[in-house]
Structure formats: C-alpha cells, structure tokens
Amino acid sequence: MLEGLIASEGIAVGKALLLHEELRIPDYAIRDSDVKLEMLKFDAALALARDQLVDLKERNKDHETTVKILESQLLILVDPLFVGEVIQKVRSEKRNVEKIVSDVVAEFARTFSSMDNPYLKERAIDVQDVGRRILRSLLGQEIQSLDRLPADTIIVCHMLTPSDVARLDTSRVIGLCCEVGGVSSHAAILARSLMIPALFGVENVTRKVRTGDSIYLDCIHGKLYLEPSALEIDEARELGRQVRANFEKSLEPSTLTPVTRDGIEVTLRANISVPAEISSLTTFGASGIGLFRTEYLFLKSNSLPPQEEQYEAYRKVAAGCLPSPAIIRTLDIGGDKDLPYLGIPPESNPVMGWRSIRYCLQNADIFRSQLRAILRASVTKNVKLLYPMITTPEELLRANEFLDEVRQEFVEKKIPFDENLPVGIMIEVPAAALITDRLAPMVDFLSIGTNDLFQFTMAVDRANQRLSPMFDTINLPILRIIKHVVDQAKKFDVPVSCCGEMASQPAGCLALLGLGLREFSMNVFSIPKIKQLIRSVDLRDVNEIVAEAMGCTTTAEMRARLDAYVEKHG
Ligand code: PEP
Ligand code: MG
C-alpha cells in the first residue's frame, strides 16, 4: 500500500496506465556492415509514425487546428533536411540510429526555438513530438494515446501538468496518481473540477506500478493499493457507495440561503474551469460564477483556441447563470500551467516569470482576441471581467487600454456589448495587496486569490507536495494581509470577495467571515458544506473567535481555536 495527498476526493478501482515513461535511448557503436540494417529500422519507424499520424488526422478531421498541426508533423517525416541529416550521421558517426535520431531531433528543436518568428519557434514542439514518435517506434514502445484509452484507466505518472488533465478522456479515466504536485496546484484544481479522484505526492509510484496493473485508489484516506484482493475491492465498492450517499445527502440544503443565525447573508458562487460545470450550479446551490478559469480552453487544445470557440464558451457560461453574475478571468497561463504551443522559453522561476497578465500584455493578439470574445459574450449584461496577477497599477492601466481599444472597435463596427461591463482584478500578489488603496479606486471589484497570495507571501510553492504541511492559510501573515485588503476596499466602497481555496475550507471560511468578507467563490462540491456551516454560526461569535485567533502567534494555536469552533457548529 502506498500513501499520498488527496488532490481530488473519490474512489477508483481500475487498471494503471503509466504516462510519460522516460525513453531510454541506447547508445552504441555500429560496424560499416550494420549501417544498412540501421537504415531499414529508420525507414520502418518513419513508416509507422506516418501511419499513426494519418490515423490521428482522420480521427480529428473535424478539428481544423489539430489537422494543421498533424499535417506539419507529417511533413517533418519527409523533410529531406531532417531525414538526410539522420542518414548522413548514422553513416559518418557509426552509432545506432536511436541515438542519432535523438541527437538530430534535439539539434533541430534547438534551432527552431532560438528563432524570433513565433510560427517557426512553435515548430520546435512539433519536431520534438515527431521525434518521440519515431523513437518509440524504433524502441518498440507503444504510444500512449490519451484519446484511445481502455475503460477504467487510472493514470500513473511522475507529474501531471494541467494540460495533461485538460486533455483526458473523462469517460475512460477514473483516477489519477502522481509522484509530485500539491493539492493547491492547478492540476489538482482541474481534477476536482472534472470530478476525477486524484492522489498526488505518492513517492516512487512510477517505479512500483506498471501499465496494466490493477489499482484501488482510495482518495478518501489517501491510499493506493496495488493488485487489490477481492475483499479490498468489495471494501472499495462499499466505501464508494457511502461516499456517494454522503455526497447526495450534503446536497439537500442546496435551496437554502447561506445566512448566519444572526441574519447576515453571505453569497456563495462557483469557481469553474470547464464550461460544462455550469449545469451543476443549481445542484450545488451556487449563485452564479465567481471565477471562470478560462485556461482550460487553452490547455485542452493543441493550439490557440480561435475567438469564435472562446466566444461560444463564454456565451454558454454567461447565459447559463443568468440572472446571477459570471466573472470571467482573462488568461492566467504560465507558471505550472505551461502551454507548449505558446513557446514560452524555459525559465528558472516560471511561477514568478513571464506569465498571466504579464504575458497577455506583451502578446496583444492573444489578449485582444480573448477580450473580443468576452466582450461579445457580455451582451447578457451579467458578465464581469477579471484580470489575474495584477502586481502594479501600470499593468492595470495597460490592460484597460487594450479593453478600451476593443470597446472602441465594437462601437465603430456596431457590435453589441455591455457598455457598463464591470472590471476587477485578482488580489493575489502581496505587492497588489499592499497598495489596495491605490488599486481599489481604479476598479469595480476586487477578488482575493488566496492560493497565490499564500504562495507569494509565504514563499511556499503551491505545487510542491513536500511543502504541503506549510500550506495552511490559517496563518497570521495571511490573515493580516487579507484584513488589510478588506479594510482598504471598504474604505473606498469597492466590493471585495475571495475566490481562493481558503474559502472552501471550514476554518478558512470562518476566518474570512471574521475579517469582514461576505462573498466567496469556490469549487461547487464545497458549497453545500460551507452553506451548512454559515447557517449554523452566529457572526458575533465568529468575529470574537477570529479576533482571538489573530491574537495568537503560531498556526497551531490559531487553528486549534477555529477548528474547535467548526467542530461545535459543523
Ligand atoms: C488563487 O490564486 O487563489 C486563484 C483563485 O487563482 P488560481 O488558483 O487559478 O491561481
Ligand atoms: Mg491565482
């Protein structure tokens, strides 16, 4: 039995599929007489790669951008420069063809990625992709095609990126398990959105599990059982039934309003990543959307989603939660949400790097296209626009310049949109929190992102499972910084809410209530339990407990007070 951190709750019993198994490239000298054999191996691998790409193209024929990518990959297989270089090097260097292909691919990828032209830069990814395909053919390893998986697959890997999760076939993948990754990482957030049980931080799981092994993934207790016995499988089924029953029971109060015993009304909205989640708002009793993480649309695709596709998603989300608001956040890409097709060069500190609004402000076409799509969707008059990771007032001013340009263009072209579209910013960088008094008067609303605010205030990487014990938001610096933001926002009469995970944790939510917040947005599954908690507390008591907790020094002392109160009322 192995143990890990629960990134997404649930139970799964199925067969393992190891992703991203490392390719071990053999490297040995060959004789002159072996050159012919190496050439034959290379020809066969190229032919196999071609058949696979043609097949993929056929299966994706309705997806224009994917077809284009596959076509450019097919061209690499017949590119005289690439093929010629491999042949020439096998002959001159007299090493096995796997080693030569691996070297030539690395060389071509390096050349492409150093180019200024963004189109050519992107070709580096295609070369690497095709290179892996040829190498797998040479090594006789099957390509793990994520779009043709057997039923009841449990993905096992070293690390899952958010784009891996976004591309999963959710009708076949029933569980995820990986060696690294924190429960506040974006991959974990996405797994919760897609309702796939996930266990992260399972040490050495890729060495202990092989593709095809039976697995029982218990993401209620944080355990993984290899080759479970019949008895363990029966237990898993029983536990699954209980989890479902508890879950259904927790939905019962979904029609009740979240109001404290002393009559203070609270608003609970949903964080969504996938437009389809809109259908669960009523089930879980959410009043609209407090955060639509638009990255999912970009992560699940092999290239930038066209404006029309984005518009369709934003329109669906906005219309689906009428008359409640839909807060749509602009692209928060980069950091742990890497998008290979954007060609962001490797950085030593991507989380603090060229990402999110910083990237958008320097990539005008991408930003404008998204703003156009959001503005078009705003005709329903319930859309609010949210910029992520604002750090300086200059960034906000620049983002608004883009928005004004697009607005002007719409006026000229007579394209309808909401002229009073509210514009807000995430407060998730300590620098922004500290100048709330300057930023608040420049916006219509503020939304505190406690996931990143914690990460940057505490210098704790949210995706690092080793630091998970440190990732506790019941913590004096965090409570103080949030209090500062809330007090300043109130001073300027600017609405402020919280859309970080802290609001979905009972003690966290109490702390936020005590700090003066009355609007929260969270993953839909947490709404029923938080609503129950709010309905069982008296705000006067909460204020007292939170003030008391803030008088403590250590997280343990603060948590003890809040947890004891939750226990009494939970
Ligand atoms: C946050 O940082 O708290 C937040 C809500 O945004 P994300 O988790 O998408 O970074
Ligand atoms: Mg964030």
Image: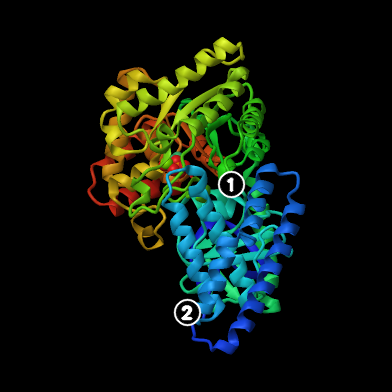
Q: Amino acid at mark 2?
A: Glu
Q: Which mark is residue 46?
A: none
Residue 115 point in image, percent of width and height: 43, 48
What is the spatial separation of the Cα atoms under label 2 and label 1, in whole angstroms? 51 Å
Tag in front: 2 or 1: 2
Q: Residues within 10 Å of mark 2 (few under 14, many from 20)?
A: few
Residue at horizontal 58%, vertical 21%? 382
Residue 348 point in image, percent of width and height: 33, 55
* Rendered position, 42 above or below 174: below
Left/right placement of residue 481 relative to residue 388 reads left
Residue tagged by mark 1?
193
Residue at horizontal 44%, vertical 58%? 110
Nearest the viewer among 176 and 505 is 176
* Rendered position, 49 above or below 303: below
Identify the colour scheme used: rainbow
Who comes first in sequence, dot 2 or dot 1?
Answer: 2
Res. 435 image quadrant:
top left
Residue 417 point in image, percent of width and height: 58, 16
- Tell me if I can see residue 372 in this picture: yes
Left/right placement of residue 413 relative to residue 570 reads right
* Rendered position, 477 above or below 27: above
Residue tagged by mark 2?
93
Residue at horizontal 30%, vertical 33%? 433
Question: SS for tag 1?
Answer: helix
